[in-house]
Image (cartoon, rainbow, N blue to C red):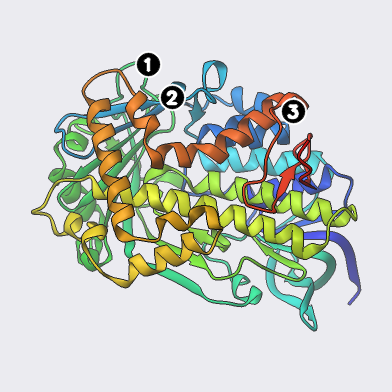
Amino acid sequence: MSVEDFDVVVAGGGPGGSTVATLVAMQGHRVLLLEKEVFPRYQIGESLLPATVHGVCRILGVSDELANAGFPVKRGGTFRWGARPEPWTFHFGISSKMTGSTSFAYQVERAKFDEILLKNAKSKGVEVREGCAVADVVEDGERVTGLRYTDAGGNAREVSARFVIDASGNKSRLYSKVGGTRNYSEFFRSLALFGYFEGGKRLPEPVSGNILSVAFDSGWFWYIPLSDTLTSVGAVVRREDADKIQGDQEKALMSLIAECPLISEYLANATRVTTGKYGELRVRKDYSYQQTTFWRPGMVLVGDAACFVDPVFSSGVHLATYSALLAARSINSVLAGDLDEKTALTEFEARYRREYGVFYEFLVSFYQMNVNEESYFWQAKKVTNNQHTEIESFVELIGGVSSGETALTAADRIAERSAEFAAAVEKTAGGDDMVPMFKSQVVRQAMQEAGQVQMKAILGEDAEPEVPLFPGGLVTSPDGMKWLPYHPS
């Protein structure tokens, strides 16, 4: 068996894998991407954030293709959540970093979106091989030096590379090869039962493309418009309530819908899709977790292979593509001989852990603000009133990133920010003034790095000079493709 040689080999052709492969290939390096499916293929996770659309996708060069794909425009989010009985809405445009032409994202059919990114990878020089199942890594001492896989014809193959990227998602079989363990959140272990409907009601213009998230006694629903008529609808329940979605799943979903008056209203004249790729009712474990290490010599985890956080903020594709951008910067810097591997990948891991931690804290605050004290689902989410070890693991996650995050190491600090967020949302929900919510600590923090990526993509070398995110850390090169040491003027 002959062994092919590349600079980088990527396992997984989803948004994370396509992004890191493309950004490395754009620097002139030889990249192989192995994907076990043949695209287009079904995937969940349809709601994007502006930083992905106007940041990463702009750098990748697919902005025009996305704009022409007919995806519904998402201008923010609408929630029936918290103290108010009526829905409330936020708009991306309130942010100074997302005003004007970039104050939106898309709701996408992932089969179409992912194929756009994968085809773009091919056009940018990535060698893409579909129908190839990765079996294991190749090691030489402490270093990962390649992958073994089975090609589309069933033949065993081996490839060597300077770097191996695991972007194969939450079902990754490779992630454990970096060492460490995968730590699961005790509080944010949920199950989602979901399907697709034709003819569902839409929110009023101009927010008809928003995701609608609705809390109810047993959990919460997502309601995502994927076209003028097609809607993704899912119910999220506690893992302890798994019996609610076992057995006859059709009956289970309809029973949960009946528990939620607003979703029942929106689906009153809709019919469930029962054929084709959207015809199956599916169950997914939405368990939040994080790996204790994201890289080892020669190998890097991106996206869900490294960590996953509850999907209520539609952060999945954002975290996948953002981590891919960070990994690409690190790999490009090492392959160019600008930085050593440890320095470059330490920056990658610190930034990705921070972004994950920020969304985790945002999630804690969001669940904390629901006032339904009679529901066991929501009682279990009152994490700041519970001295469970989850608080300890959250503290370890945040505190281990940088000295800049150590202020979050007390439960009362989390409670304080949760209360501030809830109060800001209450003011927002009372009218059109969303400034209070966007001034809250958890929202500002969640938007900080995403806004930086977006502005770098739009303005390039004209973007404001960057300072390190961590003491002694690195900054982004003017073209956004590598890391540079920081030299204050």
Residue 48 at least partly seen: no
SS state under label 2: loop
Q: Amino acid at mark 2?
A: Arg
Position of 11 with respect to 450 (left or right) is: right
SS state under label 3: helix
- Mark 2 burial class by Cα count in 10 Å: few <14, some 14-19, many 20+: many
* Residue drawn at (20%, 45%) of the image: 370
Q: Position of residue 274 (x, y in %)?
A: 35, 45
Q: Position of residue 85 (x, y in %)?
A: 14, 33
- Mark 1 burial class by Cα count in 10 Å: few <14, some 14-19, many 20+: few
Distance from label 1 to label 2 (Cα)?
A: 8 Å
* Residue drawn at (24%, 19%) of the image: 431
Mark 3 or mark 2: whose residue is earlier in sequence: 2
Q: Which residue is mark 1?
A: 206
Q: Which residue is mark 3?
A: 460
Query: Do callouts 1 and 2 mark residues in contact (Cβ within 8 Å)?
Result: yes
Residue 133 at least partly seen: yes
The numbered disc on residue 350 is none
Compared with 107, 363 (above or below) is below
Q: Which residue is mark 2?
A: 75
Distance from label 3 to label 2 (Cα)?
A: 24 Å
Mark 1 or mark 3: whose residue is earlier in sequence: 1
Query: Do callouts 1 and 3 mark residues in contact (Cβ within 8 Å)?
Result: no
The quadrant where residue 198 appears: top left
**In front of the other: label 1 or label 3?**
3
Mark 1 or mark 2: whose residue is earlier in sequence: 2
SS state under label 1: loop
